[in-house]
Image (tube, rainbow, N blue to C red):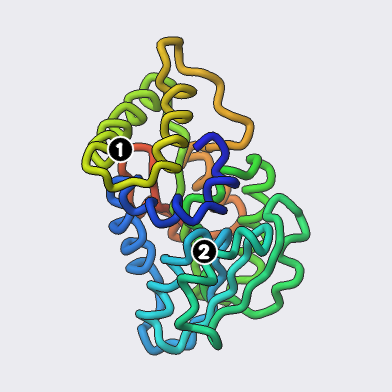
Amino acid sequence: MKDNSVDFLTPHYNRDLPLLLPRFDEMRDIVVQMIPYDRDFPLTFLDLGAGSGSLTAAILEQYPNSKAICVAPSEQALTCARECLAPFPERVNYHTEDLNDYEALESIHDPLHLAISILVLHQLPHPRKRSLFAEIFVKLALGGALIVADEILSPSDHLQRFYYKRWDLHVQEQLKAGRLSAETESRWGEFVRENLGESSFPAQPGSHHRAGMGIQMKWLVELGYREVDCYWKYHHWSIFGGFRTA
């Protein structure tokens, strides 16, 4: 849990994710519901980070004429996504690019109707998040959308700790029922020691750069996105985004 860039390379973690995060399936479903195109539209979309591939798979299933571009930092990071997306061999292109790199999207020339990200962008420093939003905006077709599902920074350390305690209660129930792998249990133990120890709320690990939802939505408006809104929120997870309109 200390470093999500490592967690998302782990097959056990990806398999455990729907159990580890309360309402993960709902989060994924809301992202799909917010896509502003009819189901028969020939959608080209960008998945920033790829992760387990489950969100991309859900879109490919519901949009039969769509194709996906998955970006992740290495072939190892794409392992789980490739496994999940194996039923769609002709409809997915894979790119190994580190999103921290300001040139990460230069190799993508397809006009995009949609860009999505789930539980990835909190790993990027704030200036890079904002610049990535700008790069995506330029690549979006008119009517296209950016939809981000991610961890956000709470307004106070107290509230962040409160949310983490509620999250721990959920995870302890999963562990007690034997639903999570030993690997995930070990990683969760690290997370609890670092974030819910006896001391005051600690500085966040360097691998995390969570930003508040409000400031990220402000960036989107400044960059030209329209109809910017929060589409869903549960504790310290949210879905927000905006559209490129005429």
- Residue 109 x, y percent position in the rendering: 71, 77
Residue at the image point whose x is 30% and y is 38% from the top: 171
- Secondary structure beneath dot 1 equals helix
- Residue 9 x, y percent position in the rendering: 56, 53
| Pointer 1 local density, CA inside 10 Å: few below 14, some 14–19, many at least 20 | many
Quadrant for the C terminus in the image: bottom right
Please tell me whether residue 188 is drawn above or below residue 232 in the rendered image.
above
The disc, 1 or 2, on the residue closer to the chain's N-terminal end is: 2
- Residue 118 x, y percent position in the rendering: 47, 55
Residue at the image point whose x is 49% and y is 78% from the top: 86
Q: Report the amino acid beneath label 2.
A: Cys
Q: Is residue 246 visible?
A: no
- Which residue in the structure is indicated by mark 1? 171
Q: Is residue 207 visible?
A: yes
| Pointer 2 local density, CA inside 10 Å: few below 14, some 14–19, many at least 20 | many
Q: Quadrant of residue 172?
A: top left
Mark on residue 89?
Answer: none
Mark on residue 80?
Answer: 2
Residue at the image point whose x is 65% and y is 40% from the top: 125
Marks 1 and 2 sit apart, C-alpha to C-alpha, by 22 Å
Please tell me whether residue 224 is drawn above or below residue 165 in the rendered image.
below
